[in-house]
Amino acid sequence: MEATKSPLVSKTIINFHEFYNFGEYYLKLSYNDKEELVIVCYNIDKLDGICYETKKNIHQVYNLNNIFRQYVNIKDIYELILDLIKDNQISLSLNPENNLIFSFKITDIKRNNHKVDLILVNNNNDNNTKEYIKILTNEIINLRKNTINHDKEIKELKNEIKLIKDLISQNYKNIDLTNNNNIKEKNTEKRCLYCGNKNDLKKCICNKYYCDKCISDNKNVICQKNCFIFDNNLNTLTSYYQISKLPLPKNFEAKVYFNKVNMIRFGITFDPNIIKEIIYDQDCPKYDIYYLCEYLTSFYTYKKGWLQSIFKTDRKLKDGDYLILKIKDGKIYYLFNGNSIGDPYILDKDEIKDKNMFLLIHRRNKSSECQLKYIYELD
């Protein structure tokens, strides 16, 4: 391939290779004229625009494992890793710091395997979003070249590109550059991000507004993938304790749909460390939590223990039900299948002052399953 300038690195690229369908990731491997190996990844499925990147010179690669010392230049290492990618000998996984682990094994002359982990650091900024648009655009071009029977995929990619462009446009719409290059916010009306409607708006926790119609038409796709998710980057459960990825505003509304109910609880926590808890089947976890059990009448707080008859309903939570949790002015409300189930629980404002609050799901039985449908900020 011809040398080119990459927008992700400032040096001249000598050679590169792109993989558009490496599982759920776009993967780019390259090396430059400064003898640096560069690996860049984006998650195509999640559409979050986050760039995962690492850059290593030859000495840094040697420090990873002595087995690399058999290679005298970065080009040879590039070709080695390229072959491993093509042979599907690479694995990608997120670590607790939300960085991407690029793992592979190489064999020495004695046929001993050496596992190598490269950390691709989470690098989230506006320039990455623009690069992501280019990646999706190239994917459309490739689809058009390779087949005429992928109209649906092309249409979906076009829609995704439009959504990202809309967000970029929205990010800069409210900024005014003065003559002395100071940046200040304009006072603008609240409008739906997609249709411009000023009525029936809901505010996502990322500060974007959507009207009820656009929400019902499923146009808030980016927030579904980036905001309405747990700490595992999904809207479904993978652990016994799951919290929202992002802290919650002081006033919010969140909806959870329960696919399977078998010992499950739903509420909030002011201590995100609960996700590190290894004892899952606890009746009274010793964390700063407030949640409702599946019987919908028993409400637990760490300070006060189990409280009965605050919330009242004639039946317990079952498969196919949903709960809406609202916190407004320090009061916790629950709606069961759209109907209120009792008076609110009043939080102690001194206890929660200046603390981050997270949504919390505690499933005491792994067969329980649910989906986080949305989180919206309340005025």
Image: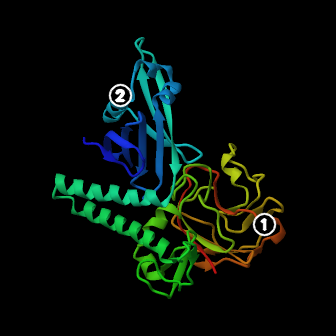
**Foreground residue, 160 or 302?**
160
Q: Where is residue 345 in the image (x, y as percent from the top left)?
A: 76, 73
Front position in the image: 356 or 50? 50
Left/right of residue 136 with respect to residue 94 in the rendered view? left
Q: What element carries label 1?
A: helix
Which image quadrant for residue 12?
top left
Extreme residue in the bottom direction: 199
* Mark-to-mark CA distance, 1 and 2: 53 Å
Q: Residue furthest top?
A: 110
**Residue displayed at 67% across by 74% down:** 251
Looking at the image, can residue 264 be seen?
A: no
Mark sitting earlier along the chain (1/2): 2
Count residues near mark 1 (Cα–Cα under 10 Å), then give few for <14, some for 14-19, many for 20+: some
Residue 169, horizontal then vertical, whole percent: 43, 72
Q: Which residue lies furthest to the left in this view?
A: 148
Q: In this view, does 241 lie to the left or right of 289?
A: left
Do tag 1 and tag 2 residues touch (Cβ < 8 Å)?
no
The disc label shown at residue 80, or none: 2
The amino acid marked with disc number 2 is Leu
The residue lying at 39 percent from left, 54 percent from top is 44
Secondary structure of the residue carrying numbered label 2: helix
Image x and y of residue 282, in percent: 72, 49
Q: Residue at x 17, y 58 (%)?
A: 149
Give whichever of 100, 371 is nearer the camera.
100
Q: Label 1, on which residue?
A: 352
Question: Where is 311 relative to 290, above or below?
Answer: below
Q: What's the residue type where badge 1 is placed?
A: Ile
Q: Can residue 327 be seen in this view?
A: yes
Left or right of 227, for residue 70? left
The answer to whether 138 appears left or right of 348 in the picture is left
Number of numbered tags placed on the structure image? 2
